[in-house]
Amino acid sequence: MESGMKILVQKFGGTSVANLECMKKVREKVQAGLNKGYKMVVVLSARSGETNRLLALASEWSSTPDPAECDSLVSTGEQVSIALFTMLLKDAGIRARSLLAWQIPIITDDDHGNARIKSIDSQHLRGYLDEYDVLVVAGFQGCTESQRITTLGRGGSDTSAVALAAALGSVECEIYTDVDGVYTTDPNICSSARKMDRVAYEEMLEMASMGAKVLHIRSVEFAKKYKVPVRVRSTFSDDPGTLVTQEDSSMEAVLVSGIAYDKDQARVTLHDLPDVPGVAAAIFGPLSEKGVLVDMIVQNTSLDGHTDMTFTISRKDLKQTLAIMEEVKERTGATDVVSDVNVAKVSAIGVGMRNHSGVAARAFSALTQEGINILMISTSEIKITILIQEKYVELAVRILHDTFGLDWDIN
Ligand code: ADP
Ligand code: ASP
Ligand code: MG
């Protein structure tokens, strides 16, 4: 093993590797790292649209695609990217090779489609870096101890990159995408969104979990846990991007730093449940056993010993949830189960909320003034989340962005 080796991990998303022209831009970014004396570990996503195409193929073949075979199929998108890109590097005389997860290996649990990384053989990887200047690694995939291929969940290449950066002690993990940093909200739906120079891990965690897909949530968890500085930047510009890092006092001065939204929401209500101990467990126990993640939960006040329970889930879990709720209805004596998929959630996030009150009230009144009905509310120390009708989501994002003055450049 070479001592004092400086390693830089870079990750490029689907739009950055979409075609030959884009891949040549990627090669320039990798070359710039080499010119600075780094050994490079480059993590690639599948070319844009490819993972969707493969998932659609699986559904065409089977109404309930086998999860392990589905992972074996969808992980091929990244294999195509790394092989093509490594050819380009070699054509430029760069000592490079491609690596699939099992060749490293990146070991995960066996939760197919949403696997968690358990370990990475960084010694083995460093060994390769003695021989090669660039290792091109397939993002999004892992391998179980029993040699089955897994995937890490949609957007999971970010997590592959940050985990590799943590394992290899990379100075920073650069995440290259189609926007030049993390904005106060999605720049593709709000033209006054402002790029942030820095954002705290905590805020980025909330933004990612509330729907800002610019970073995969687990990548932020890894970055925070192992203190890996993450820089989000564009493949198509030289902008320094946004540094995701530890919180400091200047960040606390800002009340709300970002607005996120998530359209992947479905709302389910059980009416007239008996208001007795054990009812919540009877509903949420079977859901958690089936791996359905419940997001917001509201229980109405009791009327004549009966109550309503409303909760939200991802739309993909609705069919399964309704089947489970029919059984729960029979068991508990609830009168009916209703659901609605035309809902979305909007969240305001900021570490500054810890020290200020009244943020929620300002958000509610701004939305009410525009006639947007609030369906559900949930709050945490640094976040307020509001469920609304989906058709209002873009308007709500812009209203909240405006209400909290996010288009003002305070730096
Ligand atoms: P990649 O394929 O490179 O991983 P993604 O599509 O997963 O790219 O993530 C980038 C997209 O995230 C942007 O195009 C943008 O629409 C969206 N996005 C959502 N919220 C934000 C935000 N707060 N800042 C920047 N981009 C955001
Ligand atoms: N290709 C995978 C996806 O589309 C992983 C990623 O792009 O990060 O979700
Ligand atoms: Mg992504």
Image (cartoon, rainbow, N blue to C red):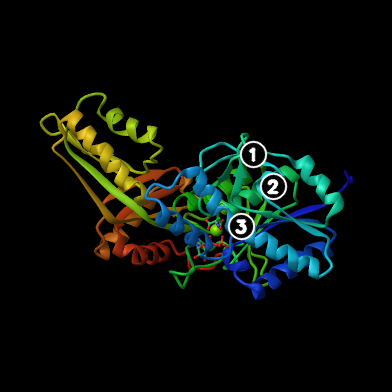
Q: Is mark 2 within 8 Å of ligand 2?
A: no
Q: Where in the figure is residue 49, as x and y percent of width and height?
A: 51, 65
Outermost residue on the left side: it is: 304
Viewport quadrant of the N terminus: top right
**Residue beneath disc 1:** 107
> Between marks 3 and 1, how big is the CA–CA gap?
17 Å
- Image quadrant of ligand 3 equals bottom right
Identified by mark 2, the residue type is Leu
Q: Nearer the viewer, mark 2 or mark 1?
A: 1
Number of marks drawn: 3
Q: Nearer the viewer, residue 262 or 318?
A: 318
| N-terminal label among 2 and 1 | 1
User: What numbered label is drawn on residue 78?
Assistant: 3
Work out whether residue 274 can be spotted: no
Q: Nearer the viewer, residue 372 or 334?
A: 334
Residue ID at (38%, 45%): 379
